[in-house]
Amino acid sequence: MGYQNISFPENSLFLVTGGAGFIGSNLCEAILSLGYRVRCLDDLSTGKQKNVDIFLENPSYEFIKGDIKDLATCMKACEGVDFVLNQAAWGSVPRSVEMPLFYCANNISGTLNMLEAARQNGVKKFVYASSSSVYGDEPNLPKKEGKEGNLLSPYAVTKRADEEWAKQYTRHYSLDTYGLRYFNVFGRRQDPNGAYAAVIPKFIKQLLSGEVPTINGDGKQSRDFTYIENVIEANLKACLAPREAAGEAFNIAYGGREYLIDIYYGLTAALGVDIEPNFGPDRAGDIKHSNADISKAKELLGYDPEWSFDRGIKAAIEWYRENL
């Protein structure tokens, strides 16, 4: 895999915020598998205890239940930490439209607390989750860093603000920060439940249980769906990135483009079911098409994603068959 040969100084300590979530728990698992120490910080508001219970017997793993909106908690969590992987944020574009004040407090102020705690504790690298949503209504494909449009949701605003704050911490406080603009990540442990669940696990669960899924819009929207292993690789390589790349944000994707309706029928074929979908209204704040130019991440981070959509979706289907 793309990160199995990555090495860090012996006994390195990684803090993964949001570590009980989908991406965070996969990062914890990967770092532990490489033989390094992990401290997981999560308030379990969206993350799940069961995602990290599998690590409890590992002496290199530590769990702190806490909220990044509390600076004292962030300060304690950063003590002795070499690398911060800040994944603690609330996702979902439509939910952010309904809860703008909470998204500001959690995704912006919480990230700012983590930046300050990392600075005061002498953290070497601060890697944080941004999002492809920062491209807003910029119509051109592929999406390229430096060509962003008008933001279309409070969620997108929070991620853009995080990038600007991180840039200030690199500029004024010499904290090496690296923003990862994730493009529609999917894979094991992604939650299929709830009104704001991501589309791939939600479809898989509904099809396996014989339900009729609803596609928002006409199904002709496209996304650069990105398997979780590629995201793990990006986070770990960012921890080894040169100082010259600090303060920047990078597209993290495979560089492909899949149409939602094609994914749907691909899933019905793979699962051996014959269920026609319902079609609902477009979701507020959604971007119609998304596809990433990943050349900047390749050049400056050494990012070289190995997991195509087809390879990733097969692995995801297998995981959900065994775990739902």
Image (cartoon, rainbow, N blue to C red):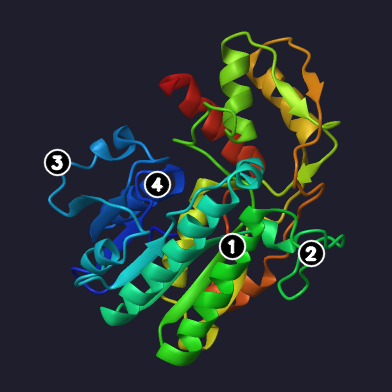
Q: Is mark 3 on a helix, strand or loop?
A: loop
Residue at numbered disc 3: 57
Q: Is residue 205 visible?
A: yes
Q: Position of residue 110 (x, y in %)?
A: 42, 62
Indicate left or right for 139 with 126 as reference.
right
Pointers 2 and 3 in contact (C-beta within 8 Å):
no
Density class for disc 3 (Cα within 10 Å; few <14, some 14-19, many ≥20) is few
- Answer with mark 3 or mark 4, whichever residue precedes in sequence: 4
Residue at numbered disc 1: 159
Q: Tag 2: residue type?
A: Asn
Q: What element carries label 2?
A: loop
Q: What residue is drawn where x is 65% and y is 21%?
A: 270
Q: Residue 259 carries which label?
A: none
- Answer with mark 2 or mark 4, whichever residue precedes in sequence: 4
Viewer-proximal residue among 250 and 40: 40
Q: What residue is drawn where x is 30% and y is 62%?
A: 15
Which one is in front in this view, the residue at disc 4 or the one at disc 1?
1
Q: Tag 1: residue type?
A: Lys
Which one is in front in this view, the residue at disc 2 or the one at disc 4?
2
Disc 4/disc 1 C-alpha distance (Å): 21 Å
Q: Is residue 7 visible?
A: no
Viewer-proximal residue among 53 and 227: 53
Density class for disc 2 (Cα within 10 Å; few <14, some 14-19, many ≥20) is few
Pointers 2 and 1 in contact (C-beta within 8 Å):
no
Disc 2/disc 1 C-alpha distance (Å): 13 Å
